């Protein structure tokens, strides 16, 4: 089942990318494993998946200890008091959205003598139920991040609203891409756009996603 699901997702990524003239190889699939166990992660790795996403520190600990060489992405809201547990196990933090978290990441990275790849989370939809910076505060926040030399800002992340028609999510992905392009022109190189999940990743790919976070489409 997982092998069939993976093949289908890869085909959909490839077709979506080619429709808009993109290279499918430029899009990274992050398999979201928050609802599955060790055996499913092992099976996914056997298919060639090496990037895995988790959003709860404690729930992911056993998987990361079992598979420390895989690329683990922290994709959920990160509390500052959990940073010690997250570093250095995760390859990338997708949810940097406040100065206090940047300060703690910098502090712990200093202790470990490492750098940390981060994405800035932007709440493009304005939903109160979602974390992330308002779009209008992104430029100023990015400027503040220059003070934290242990943080390597690789790009932006967003979550679109859950909608019945995936096409309705397009404007949110387009907005994030425009924010990336506008801020990149101001001197901040932002390579990555982490956007798109099971319900809407095809639209996200068409709008420039470089990372998509897929859970149930793989592990249903």
Image (spheres, rainbow, N blue to C red):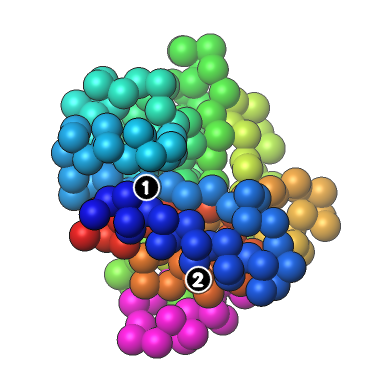
> Mostly what secondary structure, the magenta segment?
helix
Residue at figure coordinates x 82%, y 49% from the top left = 187
Asked if residue 139 is among those painted magenta in the image, a careful observer would answer: no
| Residue 178 versus residue 75 in the image, above or below | below
Return the residue nearer the eye: 90 or 37: 37
Drawn side of residue 187 relative to residue 159, left or right: right
Figure check: 84 above or below 185: above
Residue 95 in picture, x, y percent from top left: 44, 48
Magenta stretch: includes residue 161: yes
* C-beta proximity under 8 Å, tags 1 and 2: no
Q: Quadrant of residue 104?
A: top left
Say which residue appears at 46% left-offset and 13% top-offset. 111
User: Viewed as shown, does residue 9 lie left or right of 37?
Assistant: right
Q: Residue at x 42, y 60 (%)?
A: 9
**Magenta-colored span:** 160-175
Give whichever of discs 1 and 2 has the lower sequence position. Answer: 1
Circle 1 SS class: strand
Q: Position of residue 63 (x, y in %)?
A: 24, 29
Percent x, y of residue 195: 50, 61
Q: Is residue 184 left or right of residue 135?
A: right
Q: Quadrant of residue 148?
A: top right
User: Which circle marks residue 31 in the picture?
Assistant: 1
Cα–Cα gap, marks 1 and 2? 15 Å
The image shows a total of numbered marks equal to 2
Mark 2 is surrounded, within 10 Å at the Cα level, by few (under 14), some (14 to 19) or many (20 or more) other residues, namely: many
Q: Where does label 2 land, which residue? A: 202
Quadrant of the rendering where the N terminus is positioned: bottom left
Residue 78 in the figure: left or right of residue 57: right
| Residue 122 makes an appearance in the image | no
Up-down: is 158 above or below 94?
below
Quadrant showing the C terminus:
bottom left
């Amino acid at each position: 089942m997982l092998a069939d699901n993976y093949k289908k997702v890869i085909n959909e990524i490839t077709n979506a990318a080619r429709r808009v003239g993109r290279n499918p190889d430029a899009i990274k699939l992050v398999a979201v494993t928050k609802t599955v166990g060790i055996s499913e992660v092992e099976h996914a790795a056997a298919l060639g998946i090496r990037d895995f996403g988790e959003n709860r520190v404690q729930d992911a600990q056993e998987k990361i200890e079992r598979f420390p060489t895989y690329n683990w992405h922290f994709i959920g809201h990160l509390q500052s008091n959990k940073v010690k547990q997250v570093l250095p196990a995760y390859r990338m933090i997708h949810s940097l959205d406040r100065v206090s978290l940047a300060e703690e990441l910098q502090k712990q990275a200093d202790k470990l003598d490492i750098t940390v790849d981060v994405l800035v989370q932007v709440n493009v939809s304005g939903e109160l139920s979602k974390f992330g910076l308002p779009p209008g505060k992104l430029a100023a926040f990015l400027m503040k991040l220059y003070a934290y030399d242990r943080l390597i800002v690789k790009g932006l992340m967003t979550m679109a609203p859950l909608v019945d028609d995936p096409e309705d999510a397009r404007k949110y992905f387009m907005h994030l891409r425009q924010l990336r392009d506008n801020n990149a022109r101001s001197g901040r190189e932002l390579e990555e756009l982490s956007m798109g999940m099971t319900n809407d990743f095809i639209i996200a790919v068409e709008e420039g996603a470089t990372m998509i976070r897929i859970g149930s489409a793989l592990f249903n």
